[in-house]
Every structure is written in C-alpha cells, then in structure tokens.
Amino acid sequence: FGALFDFMNVIDNVSLPLKKLTNFSKNEIIERSKKSLTEVDLDGCENMMPSELSGGMKKRVGIARAISANPEYILYDEPTTGLDPIMTHSINNLIKKIHHEEKLTSIIVTHEMKTVENVADRVIFLDEGKIRYDGPPVDMKNSTNKTVLQFLNVSGRLQ
C-alpha cells in the first residue's frame, strides 16, 4: 500500500483507479475518493503529497485507493511491515473495520503473528508451496506440522 505516486497528491492517488476503471464523472470520482479517505480517518489530507505523510498515513492512503472502487475483495501484502507496534495495531483495526463495513473478503499475506491473531478468522500457512495449516488462528498451536510449530515458537506465540 505504500506504492503511492510521489508526483501526485493524496486525492489524485486515491482517485486513480476510479479514473482508469470507471466512467464516473469528475465530481463522482472526487466524492468517492473523499469518502474513502474519510473511511480511513484521513479527512483533510487530500492536497498533501506522499512525502508529507508518515508511513502509517501512506498505508491508509493505499487502503483508501483500494476501496475507492468498491471491490469484492482486497489483498493486503505485508500491510504492517515497517510500522511501529502502535501503528501496526491501528492498521490491523482499520483492516477489520474495512472488512466489516465494506463487506468484502480480505486476504492478508503476512509474517506478523499479531496481525494473524488480531485480524484473521482463517489462516492458511504455506511452506515450500504446500499448505501446512488451514484453520482458525487459535488452533495453530495444536498443529502437528513442525514448521508451523517452529514458526510459532520463534515468533513467541507458542506457549
């Protein structure tokens, strides 16, 4: 989500998919883009440039851009990478909020067990192209797969 165009302000970054993928009028595009920014708690940031944003704000703008076209699903690739624990918690809560309010399927690729525990209701653990675990996060510790258990142990989640 940090892949913002640095030569475009926030509103232009968010409205890009609407301009490319829809036949909405300019006013509709602006209104939808502003609505998406409101949903990610970035009211009033429309004219800011990416260089003026914190890492967490950039992630939020990326999420606003992703939801602006009302998708059925959204793919998050390491959404909390590089964020401090407070911002990680904030982004995790935003992902849950968007998932429920927009009623879309969220697919999250992550190595961050806090995100898995706080956001996911189903985990698919892949190792060497094979599914090693498929189920709720709370049951991962009951896995018989050594790689899953090792991952949980190293991440401090196996108690």
Image (cartoon, rainbow, N blue to C red):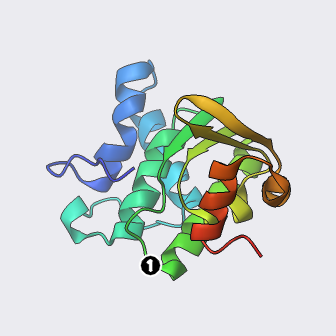
Q: Is residue 94 above or below residue 84?
A: above
- In this image, 51 relative to 143: left or right? left
Among the 4 quarters of the image, the one containing residue 131:
top right
Residue at the spot x=63%, y=56% of the render?
95
* Residue 104 visible from this viewpoint: no
- How many labels, in total? 1
Q: Residue furthest left?
A: 7
The residue drawn where x is 17% and y is 52% is 6
Asked if residue 80 is positioned above or below residue 8 in the image, the reply reads below
Which residue: 43% across, 36% down? 29
Identify the residue at horizontal 44%, vertical 44% (top origin). Answer: 65
Tell whether 68 sits left or right of 26: right
Of the residues shown, which amino acid type is indicated by label 1? Asp
Residue on which the image places disc 1: 84
* Among the 4 quarters of the image, the one containing residue 141: bottom right
Nearest the eye: 137 or 149: 149
The reply, left or right, for residue 76 in relation to residue 23 is right
At mark 1, the secondary structure is loop
Q: Is residue 102 above or below residue 142?
A: above
Work out whether residue 91 or residue 128 is closer to the camera in this orientation and state it. 128
For residue 5, above or below residue 43: above
